Amino acid sequence: MEKWLSKVVSDTIIVLQIIVGLLVIRGIYDLVTIETLQWFEYFKLFCLGTLFSFLAFGLFEGAQEYFRNHQ
């Protein structure tokens, strides 16, 4: 049961990281192609995407460590 739960948690976090990464890439692409919007808005989007990516990575590492210690 714990191995199955560990797999589900790690796969979910990986999917979240991919989604956040795609959003950051989209924000950078828009920044390069559309100059009418404010740079500050894209900078905020980039910072939030990076923050959420690091949080997801931290959750992933924490979940791995937890399941390693409780097997």
Image: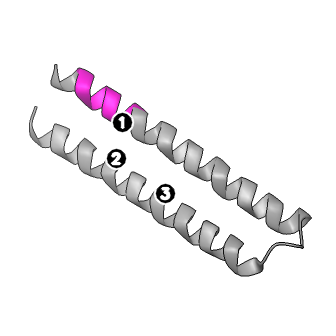
Question: Which residue, given by chain and number where applicable, does mark 3 sit on?
Answer: 53
Q: Residue at x 65, y 52 (%)?
A: 23
Q: Is residue 28 left or right of residue 56?
A: right
Three-letter amino acid code at disc 2?
Phe
Q: Residues within 10 Å of mark 1 (few under 14, many from 20)?
A: some
In three-dimensional space, the C-alpha distance between marks 2 and 3, rounded to whole angstroms, equals: 10 Å
Image coords of residue 18 (percent x, y):
57, 43
Give the secondary structure at mark 3. helix
Three-letter amino acid code at disc 1?
Ser
Q: Residue at x 34, y 47 (%)?
A: 60
Q: Residue at x 33, y 27 (%)?
A: 8
Q: Residues within 10 Å of mark 3 (few under 14, many from 20)?
A: many
Q: Is residue 42 left or right of residue 9?
A: right
Q: How many marks?
A: 3
Q: Is residue 32 left or right of residue 9?
A: right
Image coords of residue 15 (percent x, y):
50, 37
In three-dimensional space, the C-alpha distance between marks 1 and 2, rounded to whole angstroms, equals: 6 Å
Q: Residue at x 53, y 67 (%)?
A: 48
Question: Which residue, given by chain and number where applicable, does mark 1 sit on?
Answer: 10
Instruction: Say whether residue 49 is magenta.
Output: no
Please identify the quadrant where the N terminus is shown: top left
User: To which quarter of the image does residue 63 belong?
Assistant: top left
Three-letter amino acid code at disc 3?
Ser
- N-terminal of the pair, mark 2 or mark 3, is 3
In three-dimensional space, the C-alpha distance between marks 3 and 1, rounded to whole angstroms, equals: 14 Å
Question: Which residue, given by chain and number where applicable, does mark 2 sit on?
Answer: 60
CB-based contact (under 8 Å), mark 1 and mark 2: yes
Image coords of residue 57 (percent x, y):
40, 53
Q: Residues within 10 Å of mark 2 (few under 14, many from 20)?
A: many
Q: State the colouring used for the structure image.
A: one colour
